[in-house]
Image (cartoon, helix red, strand yellow):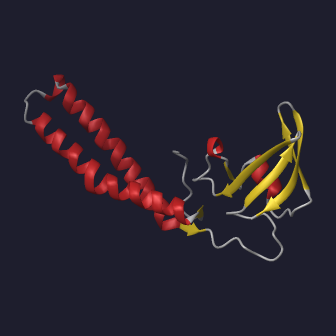
């Protein structure tokens, strides 16, 4: 998930996505970081640090954890929760679950912010090629996406 962060950009998250990031942050700050600090201290007390693999390993892990904590702090400050997607016009927007027909197959995707995107679990970013063309579309419309194999045409059958 490591992406270059623009500190002025809004980070769009679902309530669930925000909760998951808060849980990760709390876990890193209250459990993992203190555990690794203990390992660093214990390894440091073993003597010669130049040949101490445990010390080097623990320091590397601490650096990684501290970097992720910094990243999560920025994310949480910039987070904007995607509001209720229920509207009368049923246009695709952030948080929408969209049912599509492509090549005779039914696909269901949820449109999320880029930090929550997980294509394997049918969560696509509003910034992805498909997400971009779906935004603002309604039931009955089609969305065309250029793919390496050629143009794919998605027919929108439901927007929730």
Left or right of residue 4, residue 21 in this image: left
Q: Residue furthest bottom?
A: 88
Q: Is 160 rendered above or below residue 44?
A: below
Left or right of residue 72, residue 153 in this image: right
Q: Please tell me which residue lies in front, 16 or 54.
A: 16
| Tag count | 0
Percent x, y of residue 42 = 11, 38
The C terminus, quarter of image = bottom right
Q: Please tell me which residue lies in front, 32 or 4.
A: 32
Q: Residue at x 54, y 66 (%)?
A: 15
Q: Residue at x 38, y 53 (%)?
A: 69
Left or right of residue 125, residue 159 in this image: right
Q: Residue at x 88, y 39 (%)?
A: 103
Q: Is 138 rendered above or below residue 37?
A: below
Q: Residue at x 77, y 46 (%)?
A: 107
Percent x, y of residue 18 = 50, 62
Mark yes or no: residue 9 visible.
Answer: no
Question: Residue 149 sits in which quadrant?
Answer: top right
Q: Please tell me which residue lies in front, 151 or 3.
A: 151
Percent x, y of residue 5 = 54, 53
Mark yes or no: residue 135 visible.
Answer: yes
Q: Is 31 rendered above or below residue 147?
A: below
Percent x, y of residue 90 = 81, 69
């Amino acid at each position: 998930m490591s992406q270059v962060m623009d500190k002025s950009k809004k980070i769009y998250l679902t309530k669930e996505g925000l909760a998951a990031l808060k849980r990760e942050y709390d876990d890193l700050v209250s459990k993992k970081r203190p555990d690794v600090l203990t390992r660093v201290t214990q390894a440091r007390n073993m003597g010669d640090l130049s040949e101490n693999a445990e010390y080097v390993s623990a320091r590397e892990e601490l650096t990684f954890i501290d970097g992720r904590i910094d990243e999560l702090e920025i994310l949480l400050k910039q987070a904007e929760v995607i509001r209720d997607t229920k509207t009368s016009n049923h246009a695709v927007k952030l948080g929408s679950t969209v049912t599509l027909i492509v090549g005779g197959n039914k696909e269901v995707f949820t449109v999320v912010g880029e930090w929550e995107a997980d294509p394997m679990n049918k969560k696509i970013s509003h910034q992805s090629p498909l997400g971009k063309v779906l935004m603002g579309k309604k039931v009955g419309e089609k969305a065309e996406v250029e793919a390496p194999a050629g143009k794919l045409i998605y027919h929108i059958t439901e927007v929730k």
